[in-house]
Image: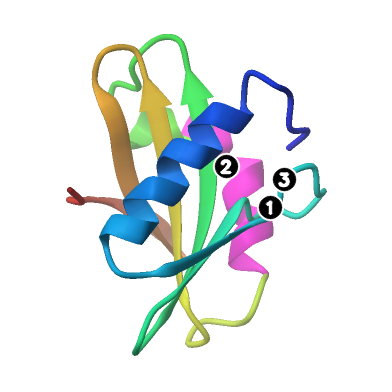
Amino acid sequence: MTTTPRARPVEFEARAVLDSLGYHALNFNGSRSPINLVGIGDDDVLLVQVRRERLPVRDIKDVNARYRADMDRLRAIGGRRCCTKEIWILSGQEGFRYYEIFPGGLMEIERP
């Protein structure tokens, strides 16, 4: 993802969420990596893609259709057991919606 001035505030908001969850957050602004943020916790590592949409995403099928290629690139990093991989989508008035990415799909999860 190319980071534009408009996208950066979204990444900073996501970084604040990681901080509130107790992770040490590192960001990759402007990189070509599918990872925008890395959260390093006491017991785990979290790789996060951050995306912004003007309109709310409807459901998991919608997320999969819009971001399949991005999620496939993230799935290829680190193997299955190295870390947790998530996509966080900020849209409309809803705020962030969080999805954990698995080798064969994804699942919506709750975060603060």
Identity of the residue drawn at 17% across and 50% down: 110
Examine the image and state in which quarter residue 77 appears: bottom right
Q: Is residue 73 magenta?
A: yes
Q: Amino acid at mark 2?
A: Arg
Tell me the crowding category of disc 1: few under 14, some 14 to 19, or many 20 or more residues within 10 angstroms, Cα based. many
Residue 112 point in image, percent of width and height: 17, 48
The reply to whether residue 59 is in sight is no
Q: Amino acid at mark 1?
A: Pro
**72 lies above or below 14:** below
Question: How far apart are labels 2 and 3 at the CA level?
Answer: 21 Å
N-terminal label among 3 and 1: 3
Q: Amino acid at mark 3?
A: Asn
* Number of the label disc, if any, that sits on residue 29: 3
* Number of the label disc, if any, that sits on residue 68: 2
Where disc 1 sits, the SS reads loop
**11 lies above or below 23:** above
The front one of 78 and 60 is 78
Examine the image and state in which quarter residue 29 appears: top right
Identity of the residue drawn at 39% across and 10% down: 55
Read off the residue under disc 1.
34
- Magenta range: 65-76
Left or right? Give the position of 85 relative to 100.
Answer: right
Residue 93 point in image, percent of width and height: 26, 13
